[in-house]
């Protein structure tokens, strides 16, 4: 399928054509990537984040302000934010599930925060210890505070293509939760295939359905690569107009509440494909590959990016 020539907008009634030759990548490695790794020194996180900014990434999720009992790996997020040398024009974001997390992120001077909900009741319970509706109630005062402090808030919806506990998730539910978060004031909704189970047509249908409730230029895709489908899913969705993708350098990561989930799509592999299609990212691939290799070496972990492995073997 050619994203440039496909006329799927007419077939689907979607009404959106690819608008731009540039793509924005939200880098997840330091948060989604490292939240599953034990005992990563703060200095290694700081070095990773700085090298990602040096490689040209403009949107970097650096940590999360969640219960340290639930996710001890992220307990040093305030230290990380305090220690990084910030570059102008780079957004340093943090996950915040509730007001307490927001206040901690504000004190730590996160440039923006992200709330995270789910389209699956079971995943919501396991991940944030409340139902979908309760999570929305918790987000309301957080959104009010964020507005007062002029902090942009991104929204995640997990399990958009399936749930580790419930299996199939209705796309109508994904669209419903996405619309709620968007109407609450999230500037962008990131649709998470938490367990990387989706396939291209399914991903496309999900995006089309959500796109009927939330404008496509306010949507991002967040694919884990557990089943090796992430690049194919992104390719299948590009001509629907989506231009923001979440990915993780060296394919780092997983989710502590989704057993067996592997990391996000490797940023290097995404950048290689996008550049090959003539889409700009502003990212220097070689520098990115070196950043990914450095953290993989630190973690004593095989580099999860095929592109980085190939480039660095030259
Ligand atoms: C949400 C909670 C906190 C609810 O947890 P809870 O136990 O229901 O919270 P609580 O309000 O009853 O408080 C219990 C204790 O936690 C403390 N607490 C309460 N809130 C905070 C906070 N913000 N920061 C620090 N501490 C906090 C609070 O102060 C108290 O401390 P105690 O009195 O027992 O000493 C908990 O379930 C939690 O932390 N969950 C972790 C969720 C998480 O980080 N999951 C991984 C990220 S999501 C993800 O990876 C998916 C995504 C986004 O990438 C997209 C995708 O791929 O699908």
Image (spheres, rainbow, N blue to C red):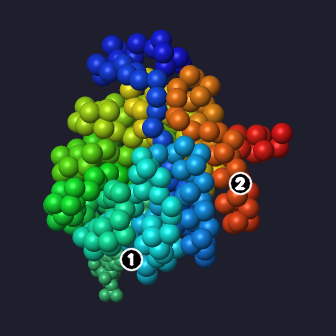
Q: Residues within 10 Å of mark 1 (few under 14, many from 20)?
A: some
For residue 148, side relative to residue 17 (left or right) = left
Residue 289 drawn at (x, y percent): 68, 46
Q: Are marks 2 and 1 in contact (CB under 8 Å)?
A: no
Q: Is mark 1 within 8 Å of ligand 1?
A: yes
Q: CA distance from mark 2 to mark 1?
A: 30 Å
Residue 224 drawn at (x, y percent): 53, 49
| Residue 293, label in figure | 2
N-term mark: 2 or 1: 1
- Depth order, front residue of 117/97: 97
Q: Residue at x 57, y 39 (%)?
A: 283
Residue 179 drawn at (x, y percent): 22, 44
Q: Residue at x 50, y 69 (%)?
A: 83
For residue 9, side relative to residue 23 (left or right) = left
Would you say residue 244 is visible in this rendering? yes
Secondary structure under the numbered disc 2 in the rendered image: helix
- Depth order, front residue of 157/121: 157
For disc 1, the marked residue is 67
Vertical placement of residue 168 versus 48, above or below: above
Would you say residue 256 is visible in this rendering? no
Q: Residue at x 42, y 66 (%)?
A: 64
Vertical placement of residue 45 versus 185, above or below: below
């Amino acid at each position: 399928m050619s994203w440039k020539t496909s006329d799927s907008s007419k077939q689907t009634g979607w009404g959106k054509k690819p608008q731009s030759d540039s793509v924005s990548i939200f880098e997840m490695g330091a948060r989604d990537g490292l939240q599953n790794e034990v005992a990563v020194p703060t200095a290694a996180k700081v070095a990773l984040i700085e090298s990602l900014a040096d490689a040209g990434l403009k949107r970097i999720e650096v940590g999360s302000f969640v219960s340290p009992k639930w996710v001890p790996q992220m307990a040093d997020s305030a230290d990380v934010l305090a220690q990084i040398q910030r570059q102008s024009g780079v957004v340093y974001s943090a996950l915040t599930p509730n007001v307490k997390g927001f206040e901690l992120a504000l004190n730590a001077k996160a440039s923006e925060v992200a709330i995270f909900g789910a389209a699956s009741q079971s995943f919501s319970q396991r991940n944030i210890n409340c139902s979908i509706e309760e999570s929305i109630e918790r987000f309301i005062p957080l959104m009010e505070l964020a507005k007062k402090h002029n902090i942009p808030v991104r929204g995640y919806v997990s399990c958009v293509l399936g749930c580790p506990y419930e299996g199939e998730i209705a796309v109508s539910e994904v669209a419903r939760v996405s619309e709620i978060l968007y109407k609450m004031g999230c500037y962008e909704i990131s649709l998470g295939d938490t367990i990387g189970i989706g396939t291209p047509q399914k991903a496309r249908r999900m995006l089309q359905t959500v796109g009927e409730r939330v404008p496509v230029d306010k949507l991002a895709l967040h694919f884990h690569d557990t089943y090796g489908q992430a690049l194919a899913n992104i390719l299948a969705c590009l001509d629907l107009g989506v231009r923001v993708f979440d990915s993780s350098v060296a394919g780092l990561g997983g989710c502590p509440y989704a057993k067996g989930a592997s990391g996000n799509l490797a940023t290097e592999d995404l950048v290689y494909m996008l550049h090959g299609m003539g889409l700009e990212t502003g990212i220097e691939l070689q520098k990115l590959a070196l950043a990914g290799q450095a953290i993989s070496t630190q973690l004593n972990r095989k580099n999860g990016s095929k592109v980085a492995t190939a480039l660095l073997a030259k």
